[in-house]
Amino acid sequence: MPKGSFPVLGKDFFGDFFKDLSIPSVFIDWPPSFDYGPRFKVTKEDNKYQIEGDMPGFDKKEINVSIKENTLEIKAKKEEKEEGKVTRESIFKGYVLPEDAVTEKIQANYESGVLTISLPRNPPKEPEEPKATKIKVE
């Protein structure tokens, strides 16, 4: 594994274990994640992935959403000082992006303590007809 990369759970990690279990591939392939902090809900729609999570108490300026080496990273960090006490809170979520994600058009919105990320998807590719090559038999 390259330095600085994260393990990806899913079909590569478990090999052929899930092959015969009739589990839809969306649950095996997406969203492999690594995290600490609140749970995020990930939904797959026809034209996009929607990622939504509760992050109450943060200011928009304290939230950072970025894509680094095919990984969507959600980070938030805050520090509050009150009566000589320091309280720190941080969140980190990371999702390995699927091949059909359109990262150039990602949108994030933070409102009323809820972060919503919309990640467009490329339309599914039509299966190609296998090409046949006739070989002359001598």
Image (tube, helix red, strand yellow):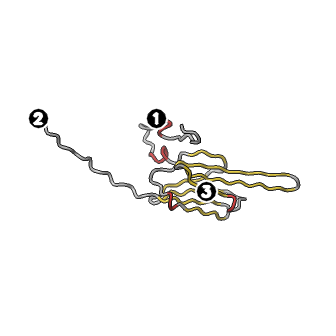
Task: Assess disc 2: are there few (<14), some (14-19) or many (≥20) residues with their C-alpha within 10 Å of its C-alpha.
Answer: few
How far from the left and from the top, in percent, is residue 134? 17, 43
What residue is rendered at 50% in x and 41% in y? 10
Give amino acid for label 1: Gly
Which corner quadrant holds the C terminus? top left
In the image, 135 versus 44, the foreground residue is: 135
Q: Quadrant of residue 62?
A: bottom right
Q: Amino acid at mark 2?
A: Glu
What residue would you read off at disc 2?
A: 138
Instruction: Tell me the CA gap for discs 2 and 3.
Output: 62 Å
User: Mark 2 vs mark 3: which is more N-terminal?
Assistant: 3
Rendered location of residue 80, percent (x, y): 79, 56
- Earlier residue among tags 1 and 3: 1
The residue wearing badge 1 is 15
Give the amino acid type for the residue marked by disc 3 in the picture.
Answer: Val
Front tag of 1 and 3 = 3
Q: Nearer the viewer, residue 22 or 56?
A: 56
